[in-house]
Amino acid sequence: MAKWLCKVTSLIRSFSAVSYTYPALDVALPAGRQLHLVGSIHMGTRDMMPLPGQLLRSLDKADALIVEADITRGASPFSDVGSWPALAQRLSPDNLAILQRLCDELSISTARVDTLPGWQVALMLQAQQAQRLGLRPDYGIDYQLLQAARARGIAIIELEGPDEQLALLNALPDNGMALLEDTLQHWHTNARLLQTMVIWWLETPPRQHQIVLPTTFSSELNDVLMNQRNQRWTETLSQLTAGRYVVAVGALHLYGEGNLPDLLQGR
């Protein structure tokens, strides 16, 4: 019954919601808390700068900007992550061959990544893939929002922070080899998904409940990296004091089963 009521409420809100030219929607929580949820892309294209006027106006009215982590401060937390057995011992022959081919294409030294944890190799490959598609970190939505918030003297709140994100990655079973294997197996799907998210910002954002996303994570990874984080963020956002907030999280957290807006609207 409760789930049915939540779905009906979400449907009613979807018809009455403000329409934005970028991936975003508004959620009103009890006790005077207004959230403008923005589906961020962590790396963007030159055409995604400057930010849309609608978004900047929402930021001007906000009491704080909320992001997954403040990526503009401090050095990378990934500089000292330990050493692991050679990838030839951790990957199947087929996946090792894919990795070696991708490293050649991306000009990544296999010796450089050979003893890194699986999750770090995956993130390095994904970053290089994004750059080959013309995406850059300084054009990312959350980066631009952080810069704009600082220029306006608006408070910044982190949902996780770099240290917590590193702890999450280090806690993945088998040093995150499943993330690396998924990255290798779904390489071209990941590229298409990146291009699709860019289109959401440059052309037309999707309707929240009218989109089917490709599966690029195993169910276990999806639970850890998407579902569990959405649930934790829901708890954090539900404890905010009264006010207006712009909340920028990865765009995929706004869509699909167990998405952040539905969890918040079900509070």
Image (tube, rainbow, N blue to C red):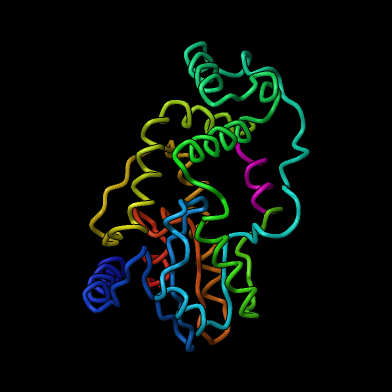
In the image, is residue 166 part of the stretch drawn in magenta?
yes
Q: Residue at x 55, y 32 (%)?
A: 125
Q: What are the residue bounds of the magenta stretch?
A: 164-173
Q: Residue at x 61, y 67 (%)?
A: 147
x and y, in percent, of residue 77 in the image: 73, 47
Q: Residue at x 26, y 60 (%)?
A: 209
Residue 40 as seen in the image, left or right of residue 200: right
Name the one closer to the observer, 183 or 7: 183
Q: Quadrant of residue 28?
A: bottom left
Residue 203 as seen in the image, left or right of residue 218: left
**Magenta portion: prevailing SS class:** helix
x and y, in percent, of residue 144 in the image: 55, 63
In the image, is residue 120 part of the stretch drawn in magenta?
no
- In which quadrant of the rendered image does the N terminus lie? bottom left
x and y, in percent, of residue 185 in the image: 42, 26
Above or below: residue 266 compared with residue 179: below
Question: Farthest residue toward the top?
Answer: 93
Q: Quadrant of residue 195?
A: top left
Above or below: residue 233 compared with residue 194: below
Name the one closer to the observer, 53 or 223: 53
